Amino acid sequence: MATAEQIKSLIRSHFNEKPEQFFTIALQVAAHEAKQGHQSLAHEIRTLVDKAKLRPGRVIPFTPDLDHLVLTTDPKERLGSLVQSDDMRGRIERILREYRQKDKLEKYGLSHRRKILLAGPPGTGKTLTASVLAGELGLPLFTIMMDKIVTKFMGETSAKLRQIFDVMLESRGVYFFDEFDAIGGERSRENDVGEMRRVLNAFLQFIERDESDSLIVAATNNPRILDQALFRRFDDVLHYHLPEKAEIERLIDNRLCSFRPKSMATDAAVKIAESLSHAEITQACDNAIKETILADRKIVTATLLKQMLQERRSAYKGSLEKE
């Protein structure tokens, strides 16, 4: 039978929500039973562990009044989906590495980075980063649409936020606060209302007191308007920018994939793509692929790609430099 220490370790790992540790100890028990000649019991334990590993994590449902404001998904994106600078990629990898080895850090009284602020223009990869974090860690992604929560529950937003933070303790995942600008503005702004100040103060308290094992990710398109008190509440702040030449080339290569000819002059296309976001370049490539398929062709031409990129530029000609 399992030793007293193994039983206590199983109980601790269960209540501390450390499934990998739980599985490891369970397999140790199975090995011990096998040595004792209890092959049938050992096989049964190993089978139970294998089945448990294949089962998706337990997700606590949100209350009906929040359910349609919190989008729950199971992302499959991986790091390879991101086209970012080497520095940005390294910082994202660091978040993943610390999370995966959090037990090692805890032995030295250190905490892993799990409260992350993503700041930058729309379409530069913030939402995709949240999906990649969830996908890489095998966690569900809960996207909290802050603008809708504030609009719908004016006067009781703080209570709704408390419900979300309570769920974090029960259901491990990546909690993505999208459109964080809705509550994160400077508390001293003249046009601010008392309700927003109270909501921001409540959020600051919730995030500071949070001791869950979930990742908290907030995204903002305009970090300049955020209250300065927010920044020190986050373990890391990642600043996103429009893609530069090398990133544009990688975006085009990755998106066109098999539709890209072996030799394609992309200099002109890259020039047109300057000032476009990652999402806009991706959409232009998708549009070029669709045109190619509908024309019964197999390769995207440089001319077609430039045309689709130019259309994306024209869509934003009010904010982009006119040619």
Image (cartoon, rainbow, N blue to C red):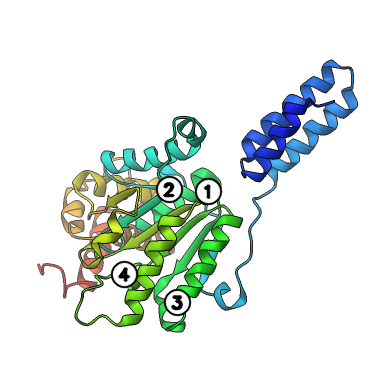
- As displayed, is residue 109 above or below residue 176? above
Where residue 277 appears, as percent x and y from the top left, is 26, 59
Where residue 42 appears, as percent x and y from the top left, is 83, 26
Q: Is residue 152 left or right of residue 119?
A: right
- Which numbered circle lies on residue 181? 4
Q: Quadrant of residue 62?
A: bottom right
Where residue 164 appears, as percent x and y from the top left, is 52, 66
User: Mark 2 or 4 closer to N-term?
Assistant: 2
User: Mark 4 or 3 closer to N-term?
Assistant: 3
Q: Which residue is mark 3?
A: 157
- Kindly report the distance in space between the C-alpha atoms of the residues bearing marks 4 and 3: 14 Å
Q: Residue at x 21, y 46 (%)?
A: 265
Q: Nearer the viewer, residue 257 or 277?
A: 277
Q: Residue at x 64, y 61 (%)?
A: 60
User: Mark 1 or 2 closer to N-term?
Assistant: 2
Circles 2 and 4: CB distance less than 8 Å? no
Residue 91 can be seen in this image:
yes
Given the image, on which type of amino acid does mark 2 rest? Answer: Arg
User: Mark 3 or 2 closer to N-term?
Assistant: 2
